[in-house]
Every structure is written in structure tokens, then in C-alpha cells.
Amino acid sequence: MSNLSSPAPRTSGRLVLIHTGGTIASRPDPGGAGVTPQRAPELGEGLSGLESVQVQTYQPFNLPSPHVTPRHMLELSRLIAGLDADGAVITHGTDTLEETAFFLHLTLECPFPVVLTGSMRHSAELSGDGPGNLRDAAQVALHPSSAGRGPLVVFGGDVFDARTVTKVHTSSVGAFGGYPGPIGRIDQEPTGPALRYFAGPEARHIYAPPELSARVEVLYAYAGWQGEGYAEAEARADGLVIAALGTGNLPAELLPLVEATRKPVVIATRTHAGPVLPLYGYAGGGATLRRAGAISASFLNAHKARLLLMLLLSLGLEKAEIKQVFEDGLF
């Protein structure tokens, strides 16, 4: 039996907090009908595991997450790459948090852990979840076991990989999940925070173009879809992602459209979990789409596949190179 134990958590260090807005920074707008980002959250003093932490704060923007774009994500990536710290925490709105996390996973190479978090309840609500999530994220970011894992998402005590995490509920405080589940867990024990990982760090592949020059659009498959909107999207974009049915299948009418497209077409699934597989040989089935030149998104959902395709196209990769990245899981 192994007698290895997890490294002790840091009780000091240099932590960078990067605030971007979202519900965790929101309160009811006195002049409006709802809540809006107003004031960045603060890390409470004297927290267990954070007693002697030096905190440096940045706020590059203050936006609800539906207003966050890939260019904001690129700004964050460049900001973090220039920091000298032991760990960084990004507070972010939950609607697009998983996309920012995955973008950073693909573009950011830095020696310290980066953790994203947010909240489902604004700061004026009863039982707001922001302070606890921020504390957990800071403890994870400064823990030696978090090194080498790439950007992580911490929510409700669960620690998620940026590749698989997704928002699974519109309003629950347990809003984040994603198959096959969290890769770790942080709990507050009487003696302090206890962080446990269920898997070791994995190698990452970095794709960091100088600019985001490519446009990628997402189309969503449904019963009876005959390709409405496909031609217009294909004409506008440098590449397409289709959230297809099941293991990556489409109505028969889409097969000749995909076959005629010379730009990369990536097939994801609209199903909550599971890979895209070339199983079915009927017109529009996954096997026929692959023969027509479509690229499998593997286990990535459509909005994450879009970001990866955008980065690869912005780097000038050819279709065959893009296919290799997706289908060999080089992300």
C-alpha cells in the first residue's frame, strides 16, 4: 500500500485575483429591473489556509458573461501570462465560464495554477454562494497539488477540468457538472481545507495565435432539419461546427451540403455527454459524414469545439492538420 500523502496546503503565497464581472459581482440595479455587475467580490480576511496570502487584484473588464467574447478571453490569457504569482483566481459569470476556461486551457502556458469561479446567487441574496466559491478557488489555486493541471473550475467544492466542465442547470447553486465528473474536491475540515484530486495532471497542447482572425459559426441539428441556414453560415465563416444528433448524426439532406463544403466542418453532439463516433452508414450517419470530410469533435461540446477550431484556423492550419488535432485529442 502506498504511503504517499498529498502535499500540505500553502498558508502563504502570492495570489492574483482577476475580476471580470458576472453574478458574483452583481447586485440589484437601483435604476433597473434586474441585477447587474457592480462591485468585485473581496476575499475575506483570516480564512483558513489563506492566513498570510499576499493578494494583488486586477479588473480588466466588468461584464455579464453573455457579453464576454473570445477577444476578452485572449486579453485574459495575455494578462495572466505576464504575471509573477503562486496562483491566480478569475471571477467570471457562469453563462460562458466554461468557454473562457477552455480558451485559457488551449492558449495559456504559465507555471502556476489558474482557477475560475463564480456564483449563482448575487451578493445581496440570502445564502449567497460567491464568498465560499471564491475562498475554495483561492485555496485550490495556491495548493501544490494543483500545479501542472492547466486552468481549473471550482464550484460548490468540486474541481473540474476545463475540457469537460459545463453548466448543467440554469439556477441551482450546483450549476456545474460534465461527464465524467469533477477531478477533485475541496472541503473545509476543522483543521483547515482538504483538497483531494482523483487523477494526475495530463499533458496539454498550447495553441496561441497572435490574433483571432478566424470566424467559426455553430449550427444546431433538430428533427426535420433540411439545412436551413447552412449555406449562409458557410459563406460567412472560415469553418463550421454542427451540434449533431446522438453520436454525430444528421438528417440525410445535410450530407451533400457537408460533402460540398471545402472549409472544415466539425461534428459535435447536442447530447449532454458522450463522444462523436462514426457508427452509422445511412445518409447523414456519422460514418457517411466522415467519408464526406467532416471532422469529429471527440468529446468536446459544440461551443468548445468552436473555440478550438477558431484558434487552429487563426494559426493557419490546414484542414488535414485540424482533423489530426481533433481526432487525436491533442487538446
Image (cartoon, helix red, strand yellow):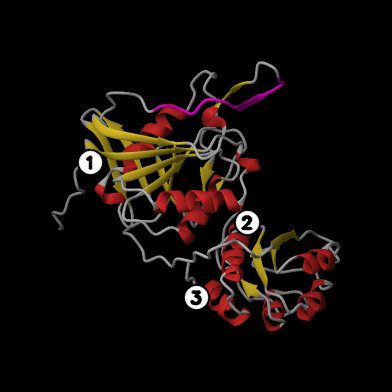
Q: Is residue 91 above or below residue 197?
A: above
Q: Main secondary structure of the magenta part?
A: loop
Quarter residue 227 falls in: bottom right
Q: Secondary structure at mark 1?
A: loop
- x 76%, y 75%: residue: 258
Q: Amino acid under label 1?
A: Pro
Magenta part of the protein: which range? 32-42
Query: What amino acid is found at the position of numbered circle 2 in the picture?
Result: His
**Residue 219: x and y, percent?**
74, 60
- The residue lying furthest to the top in this view is 30
Residue under label 2: 303
Which label's residue is closer to the chain start, 2 or 3?
Answer: 2
Which residue is denoted by mark 1 in the rendering? 9
Is the residue marked by circle 1 packed among few (<14), some (14-19), or many (20+) residues within 10 Å? some
Q: Secondary structure at mark 3?
A: loop
Among the two numbered marks 3 and 1 on one chain, the one whose residue lies closer to the N terminus? 1
**Magenta stretch holds residue 235:** no
* Marks 1 and 2, how far apart at CA: 35 Å
Pointer 3: what residue?
328
Is residue 325 shown above or below 16? below
Per the model, the C-alpha gap separating discs 3 and 1 is 35 Å
Work out whether residue 69 or residue 149 is closer to the camera in this orientation and state it.
Answer: 69
Q: Is residue 181 visible?
A: no
Nearest the eye: 330 or 172: 330
